[in-house]
Amino acid sequence: MLYMNNSQSRFSRINIFLSSLRQRKLHQQEHADVCVIGSGAGGAVVAKELAEAGLSVIVLEAGENHDPTTFGSYEPEMLRRLFWDSGLRRTRDNAIVISQGKGVGGSTVHNLCYATRPTQALLYKWGVPEIWPHFNQVEQILGVTQIQETDVNGLNAVIRRGCEAMRWRGRLQRHNRGECPTCGAQCLFGCPVSKAVQSDSRGTGKQSMAVTYMPLALAAGAKLYSNCMAERIHVEKGSVTSVSARLPSGRLEVRSKIVVLAAGAINSPQLWLKSRLPNLNRRVGKNLHLHPAVFVGGVFNETIDGHLGIPQSYYIDQFLDMKRLPDSGYLLMPAFGSQMIVAASLPGFGEDHRELMERYRHIAALLVLLHDRTTGRVSVNYQGAPNIAYRLRRSDRNVLVEGIINAARLLFAAGATEILMPYTQHFPIKTEADLDIIRQRGIVPNDIMLASSHPQGTLRMGENPNRAVVNLSGESHAVKGLFVADASLFPTSIGVPPTLTIAALATHVAGQIIESGIV
């Protein structure tokens, strides 16, 4: 028989008590009408709309709840804090880098604030023309305004000069910024002065979801868990019942009759597949569009200082005709960044690369952003991590080559003395006659630097359950109470920056949830 003195007995009871406390901490349980997974352009909107309608809402966000005043310009730290995989998420063949925001506000924290509507014709094609009025509300909450002439920096002025010389169609855009101190290259790493529009002021800096919709959701009673990774959605008898998640301190279970997936077009299908939810038509994760983009730079004698001022205020849609060619084309968009970002985008190695970087202040660049027909697929590996397969079809490669050549022509028209091509090898392009080498070289994976910031389409909406994952209300064809409210919904590539469209669709989905009567 084990003998235990009073001191040991007391110590044992304390251990049992502390163990009990740890267990309570490790296994939290919450109940809500709705659990929203993700807090970006879709999740924050759904949370706000449903909370204001009187539903109890819990939002799970895998990343941090950032204090904007902590945003700085040290790139490695900000990439780690604001992006999935520190900004190095890639397709399976390593050919395309995919930038996706991680943290409260999602990609709206780091994006460059183009506030662009799609065409109404595209919404009719998708089957949701009724969302058009929602854009007005979204734009009001995000403080969308027309960019003014005084906001045009050296980079955008040069791009406009080239566009006008070519007599192409371009325009100043609208954006969701308040009073902007024009931090320039800092914009990509979060806005340190971000503050929402108030009743008596315009607001300051970038009007991301983190300072607009999410505070409204919380004020209406929604509850937010940041640093909370959703790991599994549970289903019983064809209906959602709960979400299991991981916190720094342990586990969290949220029991709810409705779950809204708004984790982005990579993470939403990943969680669906990882949870082994019904995938009867095998469409989950398919239909991936990426808006692949390439960087084409021009070296000028004049000082451009593209890292100063608002990064993007102008864009060129001469080669995007959504009426005549609704599934093809490209945008030309001014592009620049911090020294690290530009260094990663320039061709060449060693001394050759160093000499290019010495001309940093004299470089103006364009992104060729492809409205892609190519579709890829998101699956999961044995660890449950996303596996992204995407390989450009020939027609898209040809369009991208055309876009690179036209970007170079514009830069020459603006006064560039040399063009920097998006290939790993640096070769001089000094005249338009040299551009024939681009046609010969073409687009070969890992020979050209491709990037994506707009993954979309992987849980496509549509009324035909054989072709779509969710219906036009955003609800799963296979699981009652499971909704989607992010860019995964897009049936096709959208062709333009997607933030406003995601938010308008999320407003629509929230309305459908309220009308569904599930809760």
Image (cartoon, grey):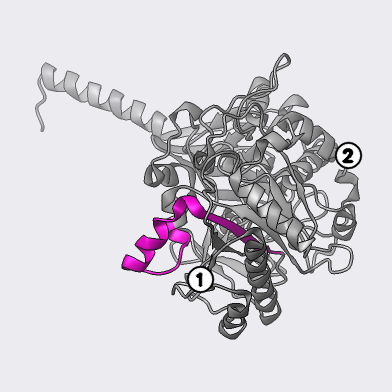
Q: Residue at x 73, y 62 (%)?
A: 493
Q: Is residue 284 visible?
A: no
As drawn, 188 above or below 125: above
Q: Is residue 131 magenta?
A: no
Q: Residue furthest front?
A: 301
Residue lying at 39% horizontally and 37% vertically, measured from the top left: 248
Q: Which residue is mark 1?
A: 95
Residue 355 among those drawn in magenta: yes
Q: Position of residue 127 (x, y in %)?
A: 88, 56
* Residue 168 visible to an observer of this rendering: yes
Residue named by callout 2: 133
Placement of the C terminus among the 4 image quadrants? top right
Work out which quarter of the rendered image holds the N terminus and state it: top left
Residue farthest bottom in this picture: 440
Between 181 and 205, the residue placed more toward the observer is 181
Left or right relative to 206: residue 252: left
